[in-house]
Amino acid sequence: MLTIKDPARGLVGHGVSTCAGCGLELAIRVILDILGEKTVIVIPPSCAALFSGYGNETTLGIPGIQGNLENTAAVAAGIRAGFAHRGMTDITVLGMAGDGGTVDIGLQALSGAFERGDKILYVCYDNEAYMNTGIQASSSTPLMASTTTTPAGKLVNRKNMMQIVGAHGIPYAATASVGYIEDLRKKVAKAKDADGPAFLHVHAPCPTGWGYAPAKTIEVAKLAVTTHCWNLYEMVNGKEIKITKQIKKPAPVKDYLVLQKRFKGVTDEGAAEIQAQIDTEYANLERLASLAE
Amino acid sequence: MPITDSESGREKTVLGPCALIFSSAQTGTWRDVRPVVDQEQCILCGICEKHCPVDVIRTGDKKENGSLEIDFKYCKGCGICAEVCPQDSIEMIDEREVSGEKNYA
Amino acid sequence: MLEGNGAASEAMRLARIGVVSAYPVTPQSPIAEVLSDYVSQGRLDAEYVRVESEHSAMSVAIGAQLTGVRTGTATSSVGLALMFEMLGVAAGLRLPIVMPVVNRALVSPWSLWCDHQDSMSVRDSGWMQFYAEDCQEVLDLILIAYKAAEHADVLLPTMVCMDGFFLSHMSQAVMVPDQEDVDAFLPFYEAKNLKLDPSDPMFINNLTPSTEFMEMRYQQFEGFNNASGIIKETMAEFKNRFGRGYQPVEAYRCEDAEAVIISLGSMSGTVKHIVDQYREKGKKVGSIRIVCFRPFPTEDLLRIVPENAHVGVLDRSMSLGAQAGPVCMEVRSALSERRPDVRVQPYVAGLGGRDLRPVAVTTAIDQMLEGTFNPAAQWLDVNENAMTIRRYTEVA
């Protein structure tokens, strides 16, 4: 039985050693608030491991296990299978991994679990690089972003994870953002009730890694959406795509870039290239969404 | 569901790595700026509370003449609350300007 | 009649495993196939998780076992190598997962066939290791392994190793016990230690400070110390119930022996046959088989090795860069100091599917009887052209 040293309002303690203004910290609170105490969490070594705690202390009031970087989905699938064998079907098994643990090294285990239809809820909180190890680029790092392993800016575009997830035809997948909390809450609730695997790709800006003031996390998150750099949509059964936040008049991508030091080296031509890339991706998304109508 | 007190249970030893104490770091000690609320101007809309990553803001009830309360034991001073406030009623001030003692709690 | 793989599947069915996660790898694949067949026929009430890799097979087993369910998986060779990272997690979390390992060489060179390099490479991963000599032993040792591993004073995962093809694909008469008797021997599984339970939350496997890390390792060390006795008790209980007796280390015609061969697994059958031939000629030769390699049965070995004997250890793997293979180093370490009368000669044999031909064993025994000794490993039955087996004309 957990000994309660410092009471908290929800399932997450208030003093967690994530950076000030951490997007992930906001996301995990919202997610666990919706999922409730009948949840078991799997966390890889990552920024999220700061919630696992240290030694005999944890900041999570639900059962959890810290797995390894590449197997969040597999450990979650095992927990699900164990509970299924015991007839405990009312427990949400949540995997909560970053972009590196999902889009890079965790992709194989994730694909396996989704193909098998294991009923797990997998959240990828995307801060667009390996932040916990010191801001190294992942395959979710956007084009031209500077990281400690792409100091001159990333030369290639990010991986489209939602398309990969969509290829598995799972019942529910969605993108979300800490800039749109109500939208995130709704999607967590839908993911919880999905009849099979569910995937949430949550944009979680990182003041430390992206180079902006901690106070700007929500502004940066919102700008990512209003510039089409991060689009909010749902994908049902891998094909029925619905854009959940339509931006009537998108702001230029440059508005988003200038707020962040990681894009400091991007020239006007570079910004135009990113704009073209973003426009193409959004046109693609709209086309796919129109097919579902 | 809030995490509050433990009920009594059976004493037991477990082997291997695990955490059995629900606790928090005193993240209030990190703060170099702190949010100060203009309670007159605040309309208790709850937007700051919703966006606080540390979840330390409590929005009082308008009908009961409530106010906006911040738990400084854990507030890291990130400033998101001041940034998202539609009324501009939260100001971030230098922690050293706060009266006398280092008031974390 | 059952093959070694079939005996393993039967044992796991009888142990009532609740979650199966396995990935195909030669020569282990029939275990995964038979278990999935049992599940689909309803002969085994289990969730079958058709994982996409061995890494996930072990990850699933760990997750499932933490919910309080007995699990089963099996692997070989490169599959075991891919699991390596998770072997340490299962051990550190004190999960008594039992896994048949069908021994096969590690790449490179590629080989589908038997040697012990796979399981020997993970001998320090915190798993107990048993090596079976025949198909009956595969079944029996798996049941013994579950029981001993789950003992509250042990809580260690266990590999039950069988030689690839030599055992895994060889049919032998195997006594399959009744479910009722197995249920009485091996009770319903409960998570006695770490567990994932929403009504009693704990966070498992978070970062451990250096002020506690050594203590956690020491707990495992103590688990192995306890295991030595508990394995013997479990083997005795097994004999009472099922009539077949085992020991962590078995001596064969060792009394007064001047030369003794130590081996593991299916090699021991060949060795014992040759020992009989020498005995018929009046030569004082014996055989020792190590059944339980982890924990290593040091005390038993000290007692069994005859006085002033020349001991030759047949390693079916090599610790490259060392003087000897892993089994020999273990034997030397056990006998050094306390048995200065004994000389331990390292031999390497039977790698990558090479049969242990009688000539390999007789060469070793003859050397020992002659009193020849070389502290470095002698490779038995290696072709003389070893260094020149590939020759070609390079383009100028």
Image: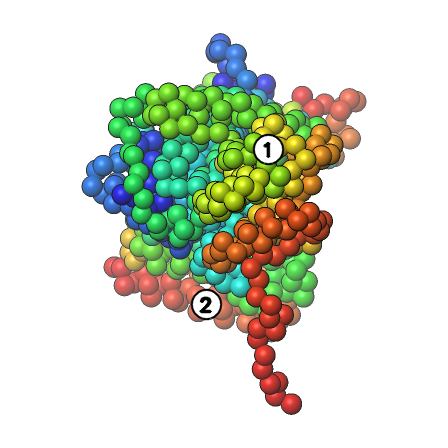
* Dot label at residue C256: 1
Placement of B20 over or under A234, stated as above or below: above
* Dot label at residue A174: none
Which secondary structure, mark 2? helix
* Mark 1 or mark 2, whichever is nearer to me: 1
The one of A209 and A65 positioned closer to us in this rendering = A65
The one of C20 and A244 positioned closer to us in this rendering = C20
Specify whether A290 is left or right of C234: left
Name the spot of residue A61 as percent of width and height, x first.
Answer: 49, 26
Which secondary structure, mark 1? loop
Name the spot of residue C27 as percent of width and height, x first.
Answer: 39, 53
Residue, x 66% and y 60% (percent of image)?
Answer: A149
Residue, x 54% and y 51% (percent of image)?
Answer: C361
The one of C186 and A56 positioned closer to us in this rendering = C186
Please, which chain is the residue tagged with disc 2 on? A
Please, which chain is the residue tagged with disc 1 on? C
Identity of the amino acid at label 2? Asp
Name the spot of residue C89 as percent of width and height, x first.
Answer: 53, 38
The quadrant of the rendering that contains the C terminus of chain A is bottom left
* Dot label at residue A279: 2
The residue most toward the front is C281
Placement of C201 over or under A196, stated as above or below: above
Classed neighbour count for the residue bearing mark 1: other residues with Cα under 10 Å, few (<14), some (14–19), many (≥20) = some
Residue, x 38% and y 33% (percent of image)?
Answer: C140
